[in-house]
Amino acid sequence: MRSSTSSMLLVVRGAERYGGDMRRRAARILSRLRWWTVGLGSLSVSLSSAVLSGCRARREAPPPTPVEQALAEFTGAYPAEASPKGTVRTFEITADRAELPLIDGHMLQVWAYNGQVPGPTLRVRLGETLRVRFTNRLPQETTIHWHGVRVPNPMDGVPYATQPPVQPGDTFVYEFTPKDAGTFWFHPHVRSSEQVERGLYGALVVEDAEPPPYTQDVVWVIDDWLLDDAGQIFPAFNTRHDLAHDGRWGNFVTVNGKTNEILRAHPGERIRLRLLNSSNGRVVMPDFTGVDARLIAVDGMYLREPNRAAGFELAPGNRIDLDLSFTQSLGEPIRVFDRFYPKRPNHLADIVVEGEPVKTPAFASPARAHVPVWAGALAIAEKHAFKLDARGGGPFGIEWTIVVCALEGHHREHHAGLTLERGRFYRLRFVNESARLHPIHLHGMFFRLLARDGLRMEEPFFRDTVLIHSRESIDIGVVPVDAGSWMMHCHILEHAEAGMMTMIDVTEGGAAPHAH
Ligand code: C2O
Ligand code: CU
């Protein structure tokens, strides 16, 4: 504990010297330190057990190398293969133009899946197979990407890399059996800065094989809209302004398409609330002060144990699942705010607890996943460092680059990606040389954040998307278990559109994946 306190002091002292910007940065580092310190307890336990087992092992065999240790810790984290039960759930999804009462209820011209924004929530159980017959009635080509779901590579919805784009009038059938239960989502991967902004997104909920008995299971899709004076979607996309900043940030923030969403509960209820940020660029930090809220999953995957819900930076693409308990009626509705910029909070939605009390049987939190600590992983040589930066040029005047390379329109002919082998541990580094935000998303794998600016982070969960702040560097640890060509990109959709995309090829390799 002492070391964390002294580094906090250092951070604060530095902030006084450098004024406003540094102070904001220091506040952010402090909020991140909370995650780090939360992890310290379990960290010291596993460190000492690692030391003990190391001592014992030394008598018989050489101690494991850091890489062997990292792989051993990964064992049992998540399965290599799906376990299909033989049940196929069929869905029809059509993308088309629509006019819907959205935001504050006025008619908005949107693009929608099945005439709804958000699109329909697809719910399946773990072990069930989805068969989605998708029809494109848009004036543009498109695809569907299943964000966070470990699908077979040809089902990943990345144009050219995994499938030809679906032309207007055409149909494509996506079929896969999710390997993980959790909160996922789907959206186009063609011109996504326009298509997602116009309303094309929906949640995919993969329930546990035996779902815990929550009284309600609710999805909140958070979006951000930029409307023009006529109250319609501002029709210029990928503007220089958006590209020079953190993408397109709108003037309306909605939950499930509305500015007045209400979650209604009776006293005694225990609710699973799944939050998803489908904005093009906006990062939100939901504040549930006044609610007994525990964080149980991030990016679909359960935590090692329930954790505090406050202070999570929900960047575009991220999901969090909260376990909400309501013991008594509340006189006033609880107003939930986004406080990513503390001085400019945005109202998200309200929670109203009233009516007849109900009885909910007590049950253990489902957050008890095997998540590696990877305490020694920073000592492992990095496989690759991705530099993130911008330069002038390209179709929009500004290009966003990964290792001095801008990938336009998903064409990768002149592009050397990164090749990894299935079943190995890798430490990857990202160095943000720009002043902007970059929520980096990896398809086809989960990773664990190891460090920010060299400071070890002990997040007790995996992610598929991590926010990298201005001028920050991060380290992640990953064991790919799914072979294929997987996209990696910034989930600020304007940055991605202007080049901030690359591919990671995961080959079969020699090693068997270390998973159960
Ligand atoms: Cu949610 Cu490649 O994206
Ligand atoms: Cu970015």
Image (spheres, rainbow, N blue to C red):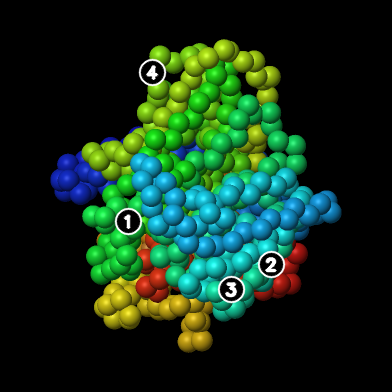
Specify the label residue 169 is tagged with: 3
* Label 2 secondary element: strand
Image point (53%, 14%), residue name: 355
Neighbor class of circle 4 (other Cα within 10 Å; few <14, some 14-19, many 20+) is few
The residue at the point 75 percent across, 37 percent down is 210
Report the residue that reaches farthest toward the bottom. 414
The residue at which mark 2 appears reads as: 173
Horizontally, is 415 left or right of 125 in the view?
left
Residues at marks 1 and 4, CA–CA distance in whole angstroms: 34 Å
Q: Residue at x 77, y 50 (%)?
A: 127
What mark, if any, has residue 332 been given in the picture?
4
Residue 232, which numbered label?
1
Mark whose residue sits in front, 3 or 4: 3
Neighbour class for label 1 at 10 Å: few (<14), some, many (≥20)? some
Label 1 and label 2: CA atoms lie apart by: 32 Å
Query: Which secondary structure, mark 4?
Result: loop
The amino acid on which the numbered mark 3 sits, given as a three-letter code, is Gly
N-term-proximal mark, 1 vs 4: 1
Q: Amino acid at mark 1?
A: Gln
Question: Quadrant where the N terminus lies?
Answer: top left
- Give the vertical position of 330 relative to 298 (above or below): above
Of 46 and 321, which appears nearest the observer?
A: 321
Residue 218 x/y as whole percent: 56, 36
Position of residue 365 relative to residue 25, above or below, is: above
Q: Quadrant of residue 94?
A: bottom right
Residue type pointed to by label 4: Glu
In percent of width and height, residue 160 lies at 57, 79
Label 1 sits on a secondary structure element that is loop
- Mark 4 to mark 2 CA distance (whole Å): 47 Å
Q: Nearer the viewer, residue 226 or 443?
A: 226
Circle 1 or circle 4, nearest the eye: 1
